[in-house]
Image (cartoon, rainbow, N blue to C red):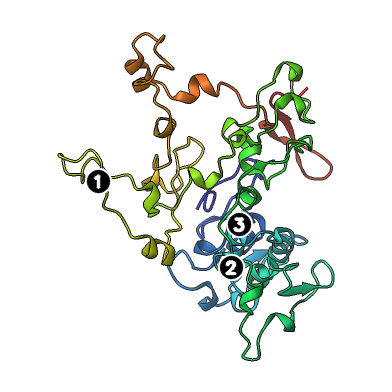
């Protein structure tokens, strides 16, 4: 997924294949570093499809070793001891997941406890200090050891759940928005400048160029109280079913047949509708399954673009975003210069649109 196996110019790290003469990053260090990864996949299974916990520690292979930061030498990594990272349901499905505690466990290599650390503060798990041992709260369980139903805080994902890994989401219009440049936890904001917020740009705390003239909101859909999941829905959600032109019978304009709701609620897909991006080729089989502008707006058939000559031709060749999102105003990294490194080891970075 994502940068697994590819060089990342922002962190200047690269997951090394076994044949490389010099190892930069091993699988264990990748899990420690790219904490936006939700778990599963390469954090659970080897590139040969074997459980990581079944691999014997071996300093000569990047899947079973780690580079000692003090000596620069490879030493064996024991997956059976560190544990692996299963997909973390809590990040999306509880109201206030403790992502900081989770990231701290990942950074320490305590992979088997990282998902549990997400529950710190829920009344299920306690931790007396950062990086201290985690312990279960006895009162959260019944006599048979099962978690009490009344304490299970499971919910549908909210915008704030998405924000932990994807980018800056700010929903309080009374609190001036401030984004710290270089925050890699807000990856989409860092790399594109995208900010999901109903707040007017002129009311924010950002030092954006010509800020006083920018009276519109950062995101019109956030201003209209749309959620991330309204467009990035589970692909088997019957509400959003889009019948393919290939499979839909020709005599039907609309096909009402779709998955029953009880079947969807029992097993919703964790494959989400997405667009396409020049930045990433992740899950290309799901490209352009997202709800597009034309899913809600009738540009050609309606009167909103009646003034536009050759409207249909425009819609065929130009994206709506070309005119309607000509610029984004978050502090995206414009350049990252690793040839001039600061004293703390970070690169020189310039940000777009910031005075």
Residue denoted by label 2 = 85
Residue at (69%, 41%) from the top-left corner? 171
Q: Residues within 10 Å of mark 3 (few under 14, many from 20)?
A: many
Q: Position of residue 141 (x, y in %)?
A: 67, 83
> Relative to residue 202, is residue 344 depicted above or below?
below
| Number of marks present in the image shown | 3
Tell me the CA gap for discs 3 and 2. Answer: 23 Å
Residue at (71%, 74%) from the top-left corner? 124
Q: Could you tell me which secondary element the residue under label 3 belongs to?
A: loop
Q: Which mark is residue 23?
A: 3
Q: Which mark is residue 255?
A: 1
For marks 3 and 1 on the same chain, the one whose residue lies earlier in the sequence:
3
* Discs 3, 1 touching: Cβ within 8 Å: no
Q: Position of residue 313 (x, y in %)?
A: 33, 16
Q: Residues within 10 Å of mark 1 (few under 14, many from 20)?
A: few
For marks 3 and 2 on the same chain, the one whose residue lies earlier in the sequence:
3
């Amino acid at each position: 997924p994502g940068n697994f196996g590819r060089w990342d110019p922002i962190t200047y790290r690269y997951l090394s294949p076994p044949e490389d003469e010099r190892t930069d990053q091993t699988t264990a260090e990748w899990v420690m570093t790219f904490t936006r990864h939700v778990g599963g996949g390469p954090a659970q299974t080897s590139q040969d499809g074997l459980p990581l916990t079944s691999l014997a520690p071996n300093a000569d292979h990047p899947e079973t070793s780690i580079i000692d930061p003090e000596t620069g030498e490879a030493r064996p990594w024991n997956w059976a001891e560190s544990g692996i990272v299963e997909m973390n349901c809590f990040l999306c499905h509880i109201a206030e997941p403790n992502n900081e505690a989770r990231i701290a466990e990942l950074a320490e290599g305590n992979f088997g406890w990282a998902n549990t650390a997400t529950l710190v503060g829920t009344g299920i798990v306690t931790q007396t200090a950062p990086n201290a041992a985690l312990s279960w709260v006895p009162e959260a369980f019944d006599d048979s050891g099962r978690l009490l139903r009344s304490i299970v805080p499971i919910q549908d994902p909210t915008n704030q759940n998405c924000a932990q890994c994807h980018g800056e989401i700010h929903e309080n219009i009374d609190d001036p928005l401030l984004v710290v440049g270089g925050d890699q936890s807000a990856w989409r904001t860092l790399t594109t400048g995208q900010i999901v917020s109903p707040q007017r740009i002129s009311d924010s705390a950002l030092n954006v160029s010509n800020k006083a003239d920018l009276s519109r909101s950062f995101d019109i859909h956030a201003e209209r109280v749309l959620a991330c999941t309204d467009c990035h829905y589970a692909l088997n959600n019957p509400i959003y079913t889009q019948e393919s032109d290939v499979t839909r019978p020709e005599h039907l304009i609309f096909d009402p047949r779709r998955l029953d709701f009880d079947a969807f609620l029992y097993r919703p897909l964790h494959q989400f509708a997405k667009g396409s991006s020049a930045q990433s080729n992740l899950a290309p089989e799901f490209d352009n399954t997202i709800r597009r502008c034309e899913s809600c707006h009738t540009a050609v058939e309606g009167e909103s673009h009646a003034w536009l000559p050759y409207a249909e031709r425009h819609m065929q060749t130009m994206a709506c975003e070309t005119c309607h999102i000509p610029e984004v105003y978050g502090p995206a990294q414009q350049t990252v210069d690793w040839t001039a490194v600061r004293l703390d080891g970070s690169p020189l970075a310039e940000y777009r649109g910031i005075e």
